[in-house]
Amino acid sequence: METLRCRIGDLAVLVGCHLPENTGNIVRIIGVVGYQSWYGINGQTFVWTVEVSHNRPLVYENCNRGLYTKMVGPVPDRLLIPIDSDSDSDSDSDSIQLGKDIAVGVREYCERLEALERSQKLKSTSLTSSSEYEPYDPVENCIMQHPGLTEEQVIAMAEAFGF
């Protein structure tokens, strides 16, 4: 029987995953699946039920080699390094520190991605031109968004509102 790294309630980072999209994902252990077969692992291995701690889903592969995602799902214990554990076991402190270092890096990466996504959303909804070479024409933009309006109607509305 293998010695388990994690326990329910632990925060952990995924490492050495078959699907690279999962590597570095931070999860919380929320339940037990038990011993079962897992792709890439010989024999039975202990599997936990985990939930993602950031808005980065777990990626799984089905039998047809198609991919699907879940926010809560199974993960083998041997693919997890605990980040914070209040267990009294003699865990390898280097592994825990590595897990913490990875977690900090992943958190910073996720924060940068989220900031970039927010920035891109702001750019796509701003009153600037979609192309850096194409000037922004507010009248034309209004006509495109409201196809029933004519140029004269848009100008009249703009003048009525003081623009």
Image (cartoon, helix red, strand yellow):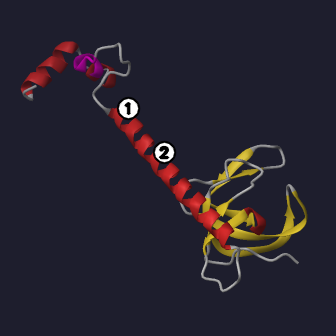
Q: In which quarter of the image is the C terminus?
A: top left
How dense is the environment of label 1, judged by Cα within 10 Å: few (below 14), some, or many (20 and up)?
few
> Is 49 positioned to the left or the right of 111 in the image?
right
Residue 37, percent across and down?
87, 64
Badge 1 marks a residue whose secondary structure is helix
- Looking at the rendering, the stretch of residues picked out in magenta corresponds to 136-141
Examine the rendering and report whether any part of residue 55 can be seen: no
| Residue ID at (49%, 53%) | 108
**Residue that carries the numbered disc 1 in the rendered image:** 124
Residue 65, percent across and down?
81, 43
Residue 129, percent across and down?
32, 21
Q: Tell me where residue 26 sits by quadrant.
A: bottom right
Magenta segment includes 137: yes
Of badges 2 and 1, nearer the viewer stands 2
Q: What residue type is labelled 2?
A: Leu
**Residue that carries the numbered disc 2 in the rendered image:** 113
Residue 38, percent across and down?
84, 60
What mark, if any, has residue 42 been given in the picture? none
Q: What residue type is labelled 1?
A: Ser
Mark 2 and mark 1: span between their CA atoms? Answer: 16 Å
| Residue ID at (52%, 49%) | 109
Examine the rendering and report whether any part of residue 60 can be seen: yes
Q: Quadrant of the N terminus?
A: bottom right
**Residue at the extreme bottom:** 88
N-term-proximal mark, 2 vs 1: 2
> Is 3 positioned to the left or the right of 52 in the image?
right
| Residue ID at (58%, 65%) | 100
Badge 2 marks a residue whose secondary structure is helix
